[in-house]
Amino acid sequence: MRDELNLGMPAPAGMPAVEWRVSDVPVAYEDAVAFMDVRAEAIANGEAPELVWLVEHPPLYTAGTSANPADVLDARFPVYESGRGGQMTYHGPGQRVGYVMIDLRRRGPDLRRFVATLEEWIIRTLAAFNVRGERREDRIGVWVKRPDKGDGFEDKIAALGIRVKRWVTLHGIAINVEPDLSHFSGIVPCGVSTQRYGVTSLVDLGIPAAMTDVDVALRASFEELFGATAGQNVGSTENSSPGTRALKSASEPAR
């Protein structure tokens, strides 16, 4: 049970603060993946600090290593093989994607604890907006109850999926702030097709949160669980995604 795991993966003494980076223009998915591969290799080699990179993408679908091609119902946007664990998901404007490159050799080589801590990061971030996000053992992602839709109805507000190379993590989380929710109808999101389980966002829940406000909450919650961050302030700019195409690795199921 993930609720029974210890949460938090603080850095050991003397480890540099995690670099914090925010891109203020949409980042091409293939460029993001290429950059993560290069950065993860540098982290594993002790040549760069850990990194959290907050981005938005143009509209697209990504297929995890467990994806079923039949879950693409209407390929209205490009479909990318992501290399992360999990199934089909959507990324697009209005969704905050957080790519997390953390060295688990130094923080503790425990993938289950890492995934549970990412979930807690999302849950604490949502709590800053008075939204109760919850885990589900039988479903992936972070969910909110929707009694306004009917008995037993719940909507997914955030997803996560990771990949690990030499004990350095890649990929991360996605929180729906104000995306076009109709774009999710082109796929079966994360393989969940039960009618009472849908997709929502902060704005859909009646919370007009700005992306910069979400970034502030993300940084505060991350530091509670992982430790200090350094670098650019939330809401400042990073206009390009540096890096070149590189290696592939094993993946871990999405949540």
Image (cartoon, rainbow, N blue to C red):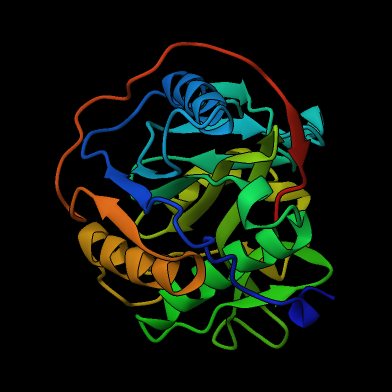
User: In screen coordinates, is 227 left or right of 247?
Assistant: left
* Residue 193 seen in this snapshot: no
Q: Quadrant of residue 166?
A: top right
Q: Position of residue 180 (x, y in %)?
A: 39, 49
The answer to which of 21 and 188 lies nearer the viewer is 21
Looking at the image, is 65 positioned above or below residue 6? above
Q: Residue at x 65, y 85 (%)?
A: 150
User: In screen coordinates, is 219 left or right of 195?
Assistant: left
Q: Residue at x 27, y 44 (%)?
A: 22
Looking at the image, is 102 positioned above or below residue 28? below
Q: Quadrant of residue 201?
A: bottom left
Residue projecting furthest to the left: 236
Q: Looking at the rendering, in which quadrant would you find the C terminus?
A: bottom right
Q: Position of residue 175 (x, y in %)?
A: 46, 58
Q: Quadrant of residue 239?
A: top left
Q: Looking at the rendering, in which quadrant would you find the N terminus?
A: bottom right
The answer to which of 41 and 201 lies nearer the viewer is 41
Q: Position of residue 233 (x, y in %)?
A: 18, 54
User: In screen coordinates, is 188 left or right of 119?
Assistant: right
The answer to which of 93 and 15 lies nearer the viewer is 15
Q: Position of residue 64 (x, y in %)?
A: 71, 34
The answer to which of 168 and 208 lies nearer the viewer is 168
Looking at the image, is 215 positioned above or below residue 20? below
* Residue 154 seen in this snapshot: yes
Q: Residue at x 74, y 52 (%)?
A: 109
